[in-house]
Image (cartoon, rainbow, N blue to C red):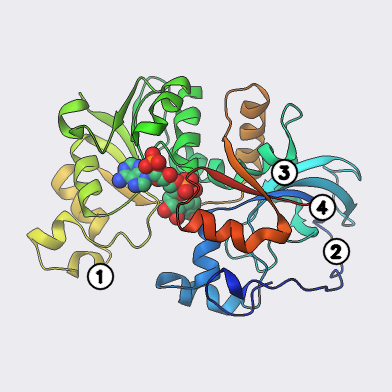
């Protein structure tokens, strides 16, 4: 439970009665949840997070879940008691999944892939649904297109590589040296080390879509220059305020008036969008099918028992652990 913003120390364990299930809700016995960067934003309430999440306090953190159905609301038809499910909640939902029993809308769940464990399953939904929203719904990628994923080493970037490959796209990514082999094994035709190599020289040709999981002026400048006219630039960073136009025009003004996408359209002929995660049952089903077919996975780096949630947050937030961290429930 989170009553106030702060360091991992503000996380409290509390015993609370379960609320009554609404008609379309499912009660899930939690087996595993993964930690996402959004959990740190919600917990710390820093910057942008303060205004967005303050109205949700007190809240329960946690957006992903993998577990078993223990009860269903009156109108739920897709799930039965005992079934294994996985899914993800939108950041606007107050009651999250760091809890023994989570209440989740039936539209935010689907049957868990049978071939993987609860720990592995819990690492997938939030990151993969974000990639799905960005590439399928926003950039509308199609077979044969070229897609550049900026930050293929993170969970969202890695899911994006696999989704784009599954849709018949040619994928290029830049990531750190430790993620190169994994990106290539996932089907990227080229993976460039963004620290050791000159990206502008290493990557050839233009792209139909760029997914930017990193943000910032420098990254955006590089990404925009790789896009074809008519291409889609999709950023996941809501507060990526600096733009080429802030320098060329009046600082801050283009963004302030929401002119960024208009300016990019006029100057470069591209479509610029911010994408955010959406709990979407069609996306989730597609992700489940890809996972079951062995075509989409997110490696888990470390698992902590839920009793060590503070240590887990500390380790991931301070980048002592670089990959996915999962919290396990007994
Ligand atoms: N808009 C939305 O709805 C959402 C936004 N996000 C945002 O997307 C971002 C990624 O999330 P997620 O994948 O879950 O986080 P992860 O913690 O899994 O991954 C972050 C990774 O980004 C890589 N990285 C850091 N700097 C660079 C760089 N300059 N160039 C290339 N790669 C870099 C690092 O990988 P490496 O080791 O290879 O350097 C790092 O591991 C976060 O900022 C998050 O807040 C996430 C989900 C939803």
The quadrant in which residue 101 appears is bottom right
Query: How far from the left and from the top, in percent, is residue 291?
Result: 64, 28
Q: CA distance from mark 2 to mark 4?
A: 11 Å
Quadrant assignment for the N terminus: bottom right
- 2 or 4: tag closer to the N-terminus: 2
Query: How far from the left and from the top, in percent, is residue 94?
Result: 66, 69
Q: Which residue is mark 1?
A: 256
Q: CA distance from mark 3 to mark 4?
A: 9 Å
Q: What residue is rendered at 74% in x and 55% in y? A: 105
- Horizontally, residue 78 falls left or right of residue 138, namely right
Q: Is mark 1 within 8 Å of ligand 1?
A: no
Q: What residue is rendered at 83% in x and 73% in y? A: 15
- 3 or 1: tag closer to the N-terminus: 3
Residue 204 in view of the camera:
yes
Q: Which residue is mark 4?
A: 28
Q: Of discs 4 and 1, which sits in the foreground?
A: 4
Crowding at mark 1 (Cα within 10 Å: few <14, some 14-19, many 20+): few
- 3 or 4: tag closer to the N-terminus: 4
Tell me whether the residue at label 4 lies in contact with that at label 1, contact meaning CB atoms closer than 8 angstroms. Answer: no
Q: What residue is rendered at 77% in x and 52% in y? A: 329
Q: Secondary structure at mark 2?
A: loop
Query: How far from the left and from the top, in percent, is residue 301?
Result: 57, 40
Tell me whether the residue at label 2 lies in contact with that at label 4, contact meaning CB atoms closer than 8 angstroms. Answer: no
Q: Secondary structure at mark 3?
A: strand
Residue 168 in view of the camera:
no
Query: How far from the left and from the top, in percent, is residue 79?
Result: 84, 43
- 4 or 1: tag closer to the N-terminus: 4
Q: Which mark is residue 21?
A: 2
Q: Which residue is mark 3?
A: 86
Q: Is residue 8 above or below residue 248?
A: below
């Amino acid at each position: 439970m989170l009553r106030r913003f702060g360091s991992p120390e503000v996380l409290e364990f509390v015993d609370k009665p379960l609320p009554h299930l609404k008609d379309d809700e499912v009660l899930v016995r939690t087996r595993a949840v993964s930690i996402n960067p959004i959990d740190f934003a919600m917990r710390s309430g820093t910057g942008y997070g303060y205004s967005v999440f303050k109205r949700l306090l007190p809240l329960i953190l946690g957006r992903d879940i993998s577990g078993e159905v223990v009860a269903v609301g009156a109108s739920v038809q897709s799930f039965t008691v005992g079934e294994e499910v996985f899914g993800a909640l939108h950041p606007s939902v107050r009651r999250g999944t760091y809890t023994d029993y989570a209440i989740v809308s039936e539209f935010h769940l689907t049957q868990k892939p049978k071939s993987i464990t609860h720990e592995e399953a819990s690492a997938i939904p939030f990151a993969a649904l974000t990639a799905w929203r960005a590439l399928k719904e926003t950039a509308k990628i199609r077979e044969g297109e070229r897609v550049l994923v900026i930050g293929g080493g993170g969970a969202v970037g890695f899911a994006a590589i696999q989704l784009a490959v599954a849709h018949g796209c040619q994928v290029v990514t830049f990531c750190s040296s430790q993620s190169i082999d994994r990106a290539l094994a996932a089907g990227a035709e080229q993976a460039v080390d963004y620290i050791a190599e000159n990206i502008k020289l290493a990557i050839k040709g233009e792209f139909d879509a760029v997914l930017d999981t990193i943000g910032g002026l420098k990254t955006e400048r590089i990404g925009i220059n790789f896009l074809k006219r008519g291409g889609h630039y999709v950023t996941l960073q809501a507060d990526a305020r600096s733009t080429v136009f802030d320098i060329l025009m009046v600082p801050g003004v283009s963004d302030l008036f929401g002119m960024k996408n208009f300016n990019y359209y006029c100057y470069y002929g591209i479509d610029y969008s911010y994408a955010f995660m959406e709990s979407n049952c069609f996306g989730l089903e597609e992700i489940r099918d890809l996972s079951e077919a062995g075509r989409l996975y997110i490696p888990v780096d470390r698992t902590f028992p839920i009793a060590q949630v503070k240590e887990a947050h500390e380790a991931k937030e301070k980048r002592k652990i670089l990959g996915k961290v999962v919290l396990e429930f007994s």
